[in-house]
Image (cartoon, rainbow, N blue to C red):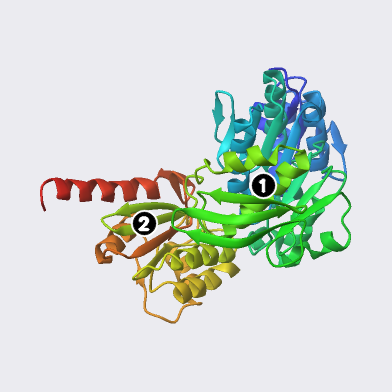
Amino acid sequence: MDNFKVKRDSKSVKGGDVFYDLSDNYQKGYQYAKEALERGAVKVVTERNYPLDKLEIVKDVRKEFGEACAKEYGYPAKDLRIIGITGTNGKTTCTHILYEILKGLNHKVARVGTLGVHYDDVDKDYDMTTPDADILQREFYEMKKRGIEFVVMEVSAHAISQKRIEEILFEVGVLTNITQDHLDYFGTMEKYAECKLSFFDKKYVKSAVVNIDDKYALPLFKDSKVPTIYYGVKNPADVFAVNVNCGANGSEFFCNIFDDVYDIKTKLVGEYNVMNVLACLSVCANLGLDMQKVCEKLKTINPVEGRFNVINIGGKNMIIDFAHTPDGLEKVLMTARKLSPKRLYCIFGCGGNRDVDKRHKMGAIAEKYADYVCLTNDNPRLEDENLIIKDIEKGMEKPHMVETDRAKAIEKVFKFMQSGDVVVIAGKGAEKYQIIGTQKVDYSDFDVVYSLLKNEKTKEEYGN
């Protein structure tokens, strides 16, 4: 499909292409549309009445773009069984679990999300959790050619809002939870939640799996537009867990699935991961899979890289986690507390040019659960790193450390730690960069921690 004629980047336009103006302001859009026409576009599809020829003015250009991409590739999603997972937290872990289960049961399966696009020998990274419609439809087209049966993908709120998932009818839609994030884009929690819930419509999903314990899910419980399985631990549900036992090496519980009871053992740590496992078991039940085989496979699945990964260095437990929201940070710190550390440290920062309101809340949560807090950078982007930290400090009352160099922050906290202490390094997980200004600078929490591990082993070897 090298002759793809639907374009959103004016610089890639060639003669005969149709350019879709997805810009966020008039002036930029005008320049892009003008460039596209100069490069040979047969028309520009837009919501704005620019002083240009060959315009097709539409009500919703993103919707038109999504539909055009699907049509151009021959609607490949119709030949795939796609599972879409939305929610503030848990999307990546659920995608990982379901991918591994389906693969373990000998299905041809693909994965799309924060960890990139992966199937067969294909492994690609994209900047967005849910790629734009042209990329998605191209990947679906390639998956179809490869004989892929299932696709497990993360569906972000931005993807729903920006109509990236047009012309995709998901076999199952999953709602993990709705907690504060992305208010820089959506403005209010109500609008954010409304966007997430709009996914659970027969236009997008054939059936649904929903966390009944989440307060924002109540509208779906009262008036679901599609057949729905509810899971949870606090409220009556179709799928629920009892006798939950979480430890440093994993979790065990009994799962009731429509009155059939299964003994669940998993390497995933924490009660929030019990909820993620319940979501995945509900999907498997929805798909009609052999649940005994599913439970056996579940025992072997390792945690996702960057999701509560525990690295022990001389009796000091270093936990790397992607938690970057108030709810995510609270759950990770609560789980770390249950490991009974002598002292609990927390290292985190907040992203620049993103939701400001969550910063002080995360500061308050960090000092509530941790004995010591170190504030540092986490993708400051175009904002002043010191002003970001001041926003976090508005929610804090106790003494704490500030070290904007993230690697130095980890190294300094490590020196303070003693055997039996635990540190949660939150926010970046498996990310391999820091975004400073407009540049991506190579950086990894894992690299820093493994360097500390290597140094400690060298000291042991030479008796220092």
**Residue type highlighted by circle 1:** Cys
459 lies above or below 118: below
Q: Nearer the viewer, residue 283 or 14?
A: 283
Give percent across and percent down for residue 97: 60, 43
Report the residue at 28% width, 65% height from top: 417
Report the residue at 27% width, 49% height from top: 453
Report the residue at 40% width, 68% height from top: 340
Give percent across and percent down for residue 270: 53, 59
Give percent across and percent down for residue 236: 77, 64
The label on residue 280 is: 1
Q: Nearer the viewer, residue 435 or 253?
A: 253
- The quarter of the picture where the N terminus appears is top right
In primary-sequence order, the first of circles 2 and 1 is: 1
From mark 2 to mark 1, how far is it between C-alphas? 28 Å
SS type, badge 2? strand
5 lies above or below 371: above
41 lies above or below 444: above
Whether residue 127 can be seen here: no
SS type, badge 1? helix
Q: Is residue 441 left or right of residue 149?
A: left
Whether residue 94 can be seen here: yes
Give percent across and percent down for residue 409: 33, 60
Q: Which residue is mark 2?
A: 318
User: Could you say which quadrant of the image residue 171 lies in?
Assistant: top right
**Residue type highlighted by circle 2:** Met
Report the residue at 82% width, 45% height from top: 207
